[in-house]
Image (spheres, rainbow, N blue to C red):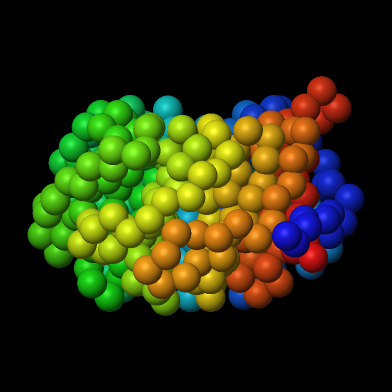
């Protein structure tokens, strides 16, 4: 098995305590973390591991990047807003209100739309990324949505449903649910990724199981993982998947028609629950808070 070793010392983030989602813009060498406790988006230079700055947006949870422009979108929780941030100037360039608190969100490059979950609700807010205006609402099954994934070519949005142990397949043209896929081997679905290279979904549960499904909802296989799984992140090439939960970081190799294969594991001793992997460098990034402060750190796979 390979090892995860620190790429640099942990970078201290001004202490307000508490993080949520992490994402990477590998083309521009940036890591973005939702520093919910400070109402700020943390911007880290992935080349040096240093914090470049923080942008006040609100009590954010979800973070998504437009890979073409580099613009960053944040879902600002109980403030009921979605923000667009220019990472070059570290400024909010636009913000819109939505009729509910926002948790996870995802950017769809085929339509230039942002899909944002209603935290603890049953709606997905559809936002035009260019104008940052709400252009629609999707009625989501259940009342506790988690992570989203999108297949831009097929025009499909996938929504994990924590309270139903299932995920929904949604048509992005009609904004209607096509199908609900039950995942009986999973409990409290959280992480969700779509691998465009292999044409398959990776779905995880809090009970320590990670599963592969076809885009149509056919079950392919499972692998046991750390319990309390929260976020998983797919690299740009679509062959490595990093996951976080239970003070543990794991990395899996993905293969067509098979369950993921564990290739690296690190017990951090810290409460890490969100993670992102840099598709260019293959570094794994996470954030955490402890008695000494708040931190961001990258790990190299060796």
On the question of residue 170 being in view, the answer is yes
Q: Residue placed at 56% from the left, 65% from the top?
A: 253
Give how far across and how far down residue 42 sits, in percent.
Answer: 67, 47
Residue 189 image-quadrant placement: top left
Give how far across and how far down residue 198 sits, in percent.
Answer: 40, 74
Give how far across and how far down residue 116 sits, in percent.
Answer: 34, 46
Viewed as shown, does residue 22 lie left or right of 96?
A: right
Q: How many marks?
A: 0
Viewed as shown, does residue 247 lie left or right of 177?
A: right
The single residue placed furthest to the top in the displayed view is 291
Q: Residue placed at 24% from the left, 58% from the top?
A: 218
The single residue placed furthest to the right in the displayed view is 9
Q: Is residue 23 above or below residue 55?
A: below
The quadrant the C terminus occupies is: bottom right
Q: Residue placed at 47% from the left, 70% from the top?
A: 255
Foreground of the two, 101 or 253: 253
Viewed as shown, does residue 125 lie left or right of 30?
A: left
Residue 109 image-quadrant placement: bottom left
Q: Residue placed at 10% from the left, 59% from the top?
A: 174
The quadrant the N terminus occupies is: bottom right
On the question of residue 69 being in view, the answer is no
Q: Is residue 83 above or below residue 252?
A: above
Give how far across and how far down residue 9 sits, in percent.
Answer: 89, 50
Q: Is residue 88 above or below residue 90?
A: below
Q: Is residue 66 above or below residue 102?
A: below
Foreground of the two, 102 or 154: 154
């Amino acid at each position: 098995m390979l090892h995860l070793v620190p790429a640099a010392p942990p970078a201290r983030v001004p202490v307000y305590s508490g993080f949520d989602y992490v994402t990477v813009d590998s083309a521009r060498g940036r890591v973005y973390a939702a520093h919910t406790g400070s109402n700020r988006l943390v911007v880290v230079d992935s080349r040096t591991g240093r914090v470049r700055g923080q942008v006040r947006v609100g009590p954010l949870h979800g973070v998504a990047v437009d890979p073409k422009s580099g613009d960053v979108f944040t879902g600002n929780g109980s403030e009921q807003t979605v923000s667009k941030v220019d990472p070059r100037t570290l400024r909010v360039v636009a913000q819109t209100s939505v009729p509910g608190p926002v948790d996870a969100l995802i950017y769809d490059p085929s339509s230039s739309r942002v899909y944002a979950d209603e935290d603890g609700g049953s709606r997905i807010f559809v936002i035009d990324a260019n104008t940052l205006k709400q252009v629609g609402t999707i009625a989501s099954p259940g009342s506790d949505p988690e992570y989203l994934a999108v297949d831009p070519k097929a025009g499909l949005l996938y929504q994990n449903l924590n309270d139903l142990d299932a995920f929904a397949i949604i048509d992005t043209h009609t904004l209607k649910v096509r199908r609900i896929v039950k995942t009986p081997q999973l409990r409290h679905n959280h992480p969700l990724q779509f691998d465009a290279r292999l044409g398959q979904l990776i779905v995880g549960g809090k009970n320590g199981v990670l599963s592969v499904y076809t885009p149509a909802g056919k079950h392919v296989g499972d692998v046991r993982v750390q319990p309390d799984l929260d976020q998983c992140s797919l690299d740009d090439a679509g062959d490595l998947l990093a996951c976080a939960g239970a003070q543990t970081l794991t990395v899996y190799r993905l293969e067509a028609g098979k369950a993921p294969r564990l290739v690296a594991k690190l017990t951090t001793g810290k409460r890490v629950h969100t993670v992102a992997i840099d598709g260019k460098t293959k570094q794994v990034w996470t954030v955490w808070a402890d008695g000494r402060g708040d931190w961001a750190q990258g790990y190299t796979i060796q």
